[in-house]
Amino acid sequence: MTPLSPLRNDDLRARLAALLDISGPVLRVIAPAVDLLVRLSLAKAFFAPGMLPGSQIADFRTALPMIVVQVMGPVLLAIGILIRPIAFLMLLLTLLAQSSGPAQDEHLFWAALFGWYVVQGAGPLSLDRVLDKGLGQSPLPLAGLVMAALGWVNREVGPVYVLGVRLWLAAALILPMPMHVMLPTMESGMLPRPLAAVGATLLALGLVTPVVAVGLLAAVSSMEMAGSDQGMTVYGPLLLLLLAASGAGRYSLDRLLVGWAYRSTPLDDRAPHIVVVGAGFGGMACAAGLRRERAWVTLIDRHNYHLFQPLLYQVATGALSPANIAAPIRSVFRGDSKIRVLSGVVTAVNAAARQVIVDGRAIAYDLLVLATGATHGYFGREEWAAYAPGLKSVQDATSIRSRILDAFEEAEATDDPVARQRLLTFLVCGAGPTGVELAGAIAELSRHGMSKDFRNFDPAAARILLVQAGSRVLPQFDERLSHFARTSLEALGVEVCVDSRVEDIDAEGVLVNGERLAAGTVLWAAGVVASPAAAWLGTEPDKVGRIKVGPDLSVPGFPDVYAIGDTALALAWNSEPAPGLAPAAKQGGAYVAAVLRARMRNRTPPRPFRYRHQGSLATIGRKSAVADFGRIKLTGAVAWWLWGAVHLLFLLGLRNRLSVMLGWVWSYFTFDVGVRLITEERTHRSPRRVGRQ
């Protein structure tokens, strides 16, 4: 007999990936049927007379609510509507039954199953799932916020609950049962001790969990057929069925093996090559959505880091370090061998030859995603950029920080009151979220962060002006929130100038509505313009340079090219352009990844892209912010805490989240600004005369 040749590691990975490709669709077909079976079984159980605590109370008026629950609850459970609240109510009643009467395995398994539905919700064969999309976009009060919260519970709490169920079942397999109220009787007589130990270990680790769950289910079924009285109640097998159909979840060796197989399976030259230009929110979301595909992915950016732009203003005002809001791109995709990261500047696209020109060399592509973002727009007056820098990059932020801090240093060194007044005048052009946040942060820096640092003047004497061409600040927000923001800014000492058009900017200051305002530091937050991606393709852009894209975010005339984020003009927000916000870019990146996955697998493409607005936030200062969620509008401290929590969640990496949170806590209690470093030469310094120190 000829011995079998050993498989190479590459063959093992390829076969495991192929097995996962087959098992995924199989589980997707089985899981809805298992979910329906479990719901119908629980509904049938709750129809049984006398099951619920209190259903046997003699007083009809007291028992009536329990009877209603016992009738309506199973009906709603069976048809799959209001699953989470019904399951939560049933969970409470089950726990009450377990604690008030004799302990039963049946109650424990009921509690585990109802807890599953509280966290995960119902499967596809339910009215809840059919109505989910419509409810999220409906005008009902709090509907969008509630659906977003439930989605978060499903994504974040769900894997933790599955881990808890696995550990609970593993403990029940191997531990003696002196505390019957907490663990069901599964170990005694069900499996030989060695097999029970192996099954418990595999369940706890989350290794081949569907196989282990099916094996335990077969063991239970065989015992029942043999007439043993040591088997589990029928609801134990139902829990094992759910675990087999859903898998081990995020926190398991199964998930690690899946990721390893997809990431490290070697590809041949026939695999498609996807090039993503830009590592902002959209580009990163797109690349992450393709990490398990049988394709080569090249992610190109001029920098080697992903930047969290919404907090750039805090770097510019010394509250945070650049390292707090940036993460190296390579570290994010370190374990994804099929994703290549290139640091370089894209200067052109040759669509006919399917090539991207990076630093003078051509990189071929099969599919191209342009996520190149936007930069400052000066409405045709590009010469203003030398006097009024914008805020789009780390270099911009550190340069602005140097300008702001240097102005205070020069004010300390001069005895000329006119020169000092000009140095201590800060003018911000544009009262959108960036302008409002900049103005508020500079005001807090001057009044609190440096209150005792200087001897020759009082930093609180600094004058901060916020100039807006429109009639109110934060024009994207509700008028009431806009009024609150202006009031809060003025309480900080910011002079808000609305209906004021900037006519000229030079080294001495700004000309506003014909009036000369002398300002030592002028900052630009009034407009942006898209990258030159439209020029690379030779397509006609809109007035701010964005590429007009189709419903699937592809570029008309270029079926292999897609554009997302600030690069694209997508009429995906109730037939209006999607906003230039981080959530819009992330949604667009995830959507294009789904389109490309469907295209490479020859599957039906997803529906046209629709931007789902989850709310707008802007902070003004300490315990002062505004939040607009449509019908729900928040102001003050509540909005400020919410703003902080949302930004922490969006930050990339645990290290950055912890460092930013600790920095904020320190600043909150001490009023101290942590990063007051002037890192640029004083090339913009005006002549001064040194006085007493």
Image (cartoon, rainbow, N blue to C red):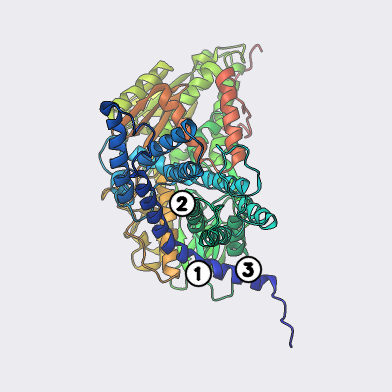
Q: Quadrant of the N terminus?
A: bottom right
User: What residue is pinned by disc 3?
Assistant: 13
SS class of the residue under badge 1?
Answer: helix
Name which residue type carries label 1: Ile
Q: Which picture quadrant has residue 124?
A: bottom left
Q: How far across and down, in percent of the image, does residue 74 sit?
A: 32, 45
Q: Which picture quadrant has residue 141?
A: top left
Gap between marks 3 and 1, in whole Å?
A: 14 Å
SS class of the residue under badge 2?
Answer: helix
- Which residue occupies the foreground of this view, 654 or 111? 111
Q: Residue furthest bottom?
A: 1
Q: How far across and down, in percent of the image, does residue 673 sit?
A: 59, 24
At 55% across and 69% down in the image, what residue appears? 19
For discs 2 and 1, the disc positioned in front in the rendered view:
1
* Horizontal relation, residue 48 to residue 161: left or right: left
Gap between marks 2 and 1, in whole Å?
A: 30 Å
**Residue 10 vertical position relative to residue 510 in the rendered view, above or below:** below
Disc 2 packing (10 Å; few <14; some 14–19; many ≥20)? many
Q: Quadrant of the C terminus?
A: top right
- Which residue occupies the foreground of this view, 23 or 65? 65
Badge 2 or badge 3: first in the primary sequence: 3
Q: How far across and down, in percent of the image, does residue 347 sit?
A: 50, 59
Q: How far across and down, in percent of the image, does residue 182 sit?
A: 56, 38
- Which residue occupies the foreground of this view, 495 or 51? 51
User: What residue is pinned by disc 2?
Assistant: 282
User: What residue is pinned by disc 1?
Assistant: 22
Gap between marks 2 and 3, in whole Å?
A: 30 Å
At 63% across and 13% down in the image, what residue appears? 691
